[in-house]
């Protein structure tokens, strides 16, 4: 196992200021995406396009490092998409080349090939057609930070000192495909507290994206900031273009 949390001497002392504890009563979710370029004909009409396939896994409790599951356990998704779907005519590959047929195919692959713990947490498979739009400026917070994760097997790449270009968004709890504007209080807090920092100095927890999303959800609740519907915000945090973590606080 790699070194205990916070043991890297380059981290320095923890930064001052209290952060909320992990909230109780909510759902952790992660998403893993894979893209491919395909040809297909649907009802006599050409449907060639860029396709994004997304696995969604959910859990009420995290593993010891702070994962729903290790994103590395989902890396086979892109490999499968590259081998079977990318740059193919899907009418020659799948019995049903619609988005629903692609989702069914990927779900069947996931049930056969994901590790047991990941397969049991699989909640949904989604398919998006076309380029995914970037969030509007008022719907996102971009920040850069570094971290390293502990309680991982020796040699795990996430145990090394590394950095990410993070993207924070707030999906509408009533319409998850719609993003809500980020409150200025949260934007200022994230940029002043996290941007350019070693997150191991900021958090008492292993700074996984799941932990960060949950703590920021709790911060919003503590400051009585809610979605327009009055429901608690759900915070989604992406470390890479193909992965995201989200925490949704259950309403009291």
Image (spheres, helix red, strand yellow):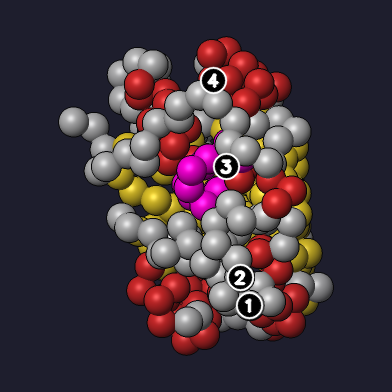
Q: Which residue is mark 3?
A: 237
Residue drawn at 26 percent across, 38 percent down: 250
- Label 4 Cα crowd, 10 Å radius (few <14 / some 14-19 / many 20+): some
Q: CA distance from mark 4 to mark 3?
A: 13 Å
Residue extending farthest to the top is 184
Mark 1: few/some/many CA within 10 Å (<14, 14-19, 20+): few
- State the SS at label 4: helix
Q: Single out the mark in the foreground, 4 or 2.
A: 2
Asked whether residue 241 is in view, the answer is no
Q: Split into 4 quadrants, where in the image is the N terminus?
A: bottom right
Crowd around label 3: few <14 · some 14–19 · many ≥20 (10 Å): many
Compared across the picture, whether 211 is left or right of 134 comes to left
- Numbered range of the magenta stretch: 201-212
Residue at 31%, 19% in the rendered image: 230
How dense is the environment of label 2, judged by Cα within 10 Å: few (below 14), some, or many (20 and up)?
some
Q: Within the magenta stretch, is there residue 118?
A: no
Q: Which residue is mark 1?
A: 154
Q: Looking at the image, is mark 4 or mark 3 earlier in the sequence?
A: 4
């Amino acid at each position: 196992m790699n070194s205990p949390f916070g043991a890297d001497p380059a981290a320095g002392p923890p930064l001052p200021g209290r952060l909320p504890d992990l909230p109780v009563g909510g759902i952790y979710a992660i998403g893993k995406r894979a893209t491919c370029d395909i040809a297909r004909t649907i009802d006599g009409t050409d449907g060639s396009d860029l396709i994004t396939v997304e696995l969604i896994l959910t859990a009420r409790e995290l593993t010891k490092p702070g994962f729903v599951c290790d994103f590395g356990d989902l890396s086979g998704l892109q490999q499968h998409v590259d081998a079977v779907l990318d740059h193919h005519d899907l009418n020659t590959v799948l019995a049903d080349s619609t988005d629903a047929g692609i989702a069914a195919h990927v779900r069947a692959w996931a049930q056969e090939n994901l590790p047991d713990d990941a397969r049991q947490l699989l909640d949904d498979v989604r398919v998006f057609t076309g380029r995914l739009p970037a969030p509007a400026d008022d719907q996102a917070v971009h920040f850069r930070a570094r971290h390293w994760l502990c309680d991982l097997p020796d040699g795990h790449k996430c145990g090394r000192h590394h950095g990410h270009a993070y993207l924070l968004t707030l999906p509408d709890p009533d319409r998850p495909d719609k993003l809500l504007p980020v409150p200025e209080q949260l934007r200022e807090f994230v940029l002043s507290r996290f941007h350019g920092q070693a997150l191991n100095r900021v958090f008492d927890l292993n700074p996984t994206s799941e932990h960060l999303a949950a703590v920021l959800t709790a911060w919003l609740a503590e400051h009585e900031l809610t979605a327009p519907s009055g429901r608690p915000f759900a915070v989604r945090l992406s470390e890479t273009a193909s992965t995201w973590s989200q925490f949704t606080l259950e309403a009291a």
